[in-house]
Image (cartoon, rainbow, N blue to C red):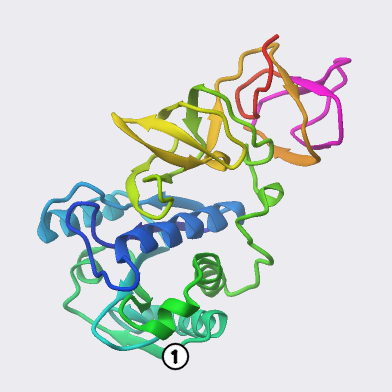
Amino acid sequence: MAIYNVHGGHSLVCRGASGLLDEVNEDRKVKNKVIELLRAAGHTVYDCTDDSGRTQGQNLGAIVRKCNAHKVDLDVSIHLNAGGGTGVEVENYNGNTAAISDRICANISSALGIRNRGTKYMTDLYVLRNTNSPAILIECCFVDNATDKAAWNVDKCAKAIVEGILNKSIGNTNSGNTNSRKGVGTVRKLTPGKAFLYCDAPIYKRDWKTVIINGHKGDEVTILDTGTAGVKVKYNNSIGYMECKYLMPYISTGDLLEVVEDFTVTIRKGTVLRAADNGYLGSRVTIHDGNVSIDDRFVQKVKNK
């Protein structure tokens, strides 16, 4: 399996282009989905996004430091373009990444129905010039073009990018289908209390469009209300809204898990799932009804022991 760095361009302070779309908001959505799909395919992925850089120099320096902390097969920088054009293009430092870039351009162009501007070469872009590993910078579409705005679809774009990187089809990736996800995104009812982030994920304002901050895998979050798709949360003194699929509540040995729908669970290596009658279920199972208990905190808790 391969190893990748992926990051969204710019920061929440030093923001990128805006128009009919906001670059920072949209590139974070695409970045998160790309990471999710690559990890689901079994690859190791590091999120090298910088959200705190106050100047362009601080932002670019932080991204490159994060990227160069890992030896990877490819650095992927995700952006949206501006300036009155239309379509997708991918910037490269040299021809070593041309094949991947050609595939990504063709895939996004086909998926969104926008112009394929093609693979381009830029030796003066800071990230491409200073990362140790091969790197590409994807300009997914133009934020100030009405045609691109009308065609814009985060899931389609992310899928096109991942299929270009892997050079194969990865099937349906509709984010509305939580049953297709690995991890805790399968039992979706959440209630107030402490939880952990299953993966890097955005926290939004009430409009569910504007990103306040990006949470990081393993960090603690406080859930403030009850929800089945999204919930109000507190994270690092910020209060916003997050999709339930990214959260895993505290679960203790002996807690009962009430299954509310058919689902498949992927759990941490070494964790044991047992049915109510103590029958062993294995590390990857499909449960159709009844209650289960778990020896770790990787599946939704519905009621206490």
Q: What stretch is highlighted in magenta?
A: 269-293
Image: 165 above or below 116:
above
Q: Is residue 233 left or right of residue 65?
A: right
Amino acid type shown at disc 1: Arg
Residue depicted at x 66% and y 26%:
270
The residue to which callout 1 is attached is: 115
Chief SS of the magenta region? loop
What residue appears at the point 64 percent right and 32 percent down from the top-left corner? 189
For this rendering, which residue is in front, 264 or 212? 212
In the rendered view, would you say 99 is above or below 10?
Answer: below
Q: Which residue is drawn at 36% across and 45% down?
A: 205
How dense is the environment of label 1, judged by Cα within 10 Å: few (below 14), some, or many (20 and up)?
some
Is residue 246 at all visible to an observer of this figure? yes
Q: Is residue 292 magenta?
A: yes
Residue 136 visible to an observer of this rendering: no
Secondary structure under tag 1 reads loop
